[in-house]
Amino acid sequence: MATAAARARKRDLGPDWREALAASFKRFALRSWGILLLGVSIAGALALATHNSTDPSFTTAAGGPPANWLGSVGAYASDALLLLFGLGSALLLPVVGLAALSFAARRPTNLGVTDGRLAACPASPNCVSTQATDESHRIEPIPLEDTPQSAIERLKSAVASMPRMTVVTETDNYLHIEATSRLFRFVDDVEFFIDQDARLIHFRSASRVGHSDLGANRARMERIQAALVPKQTGP
């Protein structure tokens, strides 16, 4: 009987073990890809910065050693970038670099609720929070009109209707979601805290890398607000 019970426990742990291994491998693959992309973007920027029109390349049949700091590879790479993207290459490479940092970035260690508060927003504008005190980061909380359990379910339902949103952590009063952008795979951390005493749903949304998010975090949270707060009707 004891042996049978032990086997049953092992069978129960099997799927969780596989999921954990798959998640670990995925994180490793994403970070490796991010490091590779970062190296490529730095090399591309260096090649562009030392581009010389007299170097041998796709558009120049010049002889002699290339002046590009990355040699012939840099000369051909910078020429190809300018042919494909023109001066826009100077803008493309930093964006690729930021995307690489996003792939390689680890999950922030300051997530969660401490003494009834979510983490403070950084000075950069790529964060909004209902507990921020300055107008540039401040956004209004959502009234809690039902039980915390029901609120969590409504939040998950609202999030499920939005693309590339993944629930990472869920408790009876807290939700952490990763929002991933479509093209460059930037990751934003979205958190919800059910404050039952104040009858409010507090939330925070912040980008992991970069400085400006062009209003993406605020727009996302306003959309979730609109989905959860019932519209006022006239008399």
Image: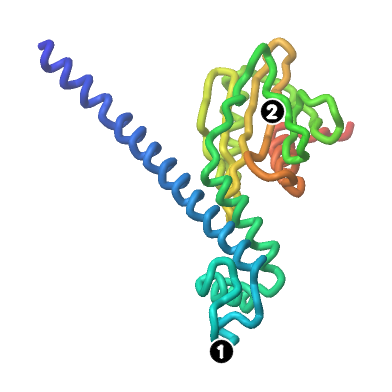
Q: Nearer the viewer, residue 93 or 227?
A: 93
The answer to whether residue 83 is above or below residue 227 is: below
Q: Which of 51 and 158 is in front in this view?
A: 51
The answer to whether residue 211 is above or below residue 150 is: below
Percent position of residue 205, x then y: 68, 35
- Residue 207, visible in the rendered structure: yes
The answer to whether residue 65 is above or below residue 60 is: above
Distance from the alpha carbon under mark 2 to that under mark 1 = 59 Å
Label 1 element class = loop
Badge number at residue 207: none
10 Å crowding of disc 2: few (<14), some (14-19), many (20+):
many
Percent position of residue 212, x then y: 74, 46
Verify CB contact (< 8 Å) between mark 2 and mark 1: no
| Colour scheme | rainbow
Provide the residue designation for mark 2.
Answer: 203
Furthest residue in direction bottom, as rendered: 61
Provide the residue designation for mark 1.
Answer: 61
Residue 211 placement, left or right of 20? right
Of the 4 image quadrants, the one containing the C terminus is: top right
Residue at position x 62%, y 62% in the image: 45
- Residue 163, visible in the rendered structure: no
Give, as a three-letter code, the residue at label 2: Phe
Label 2 element class = strand
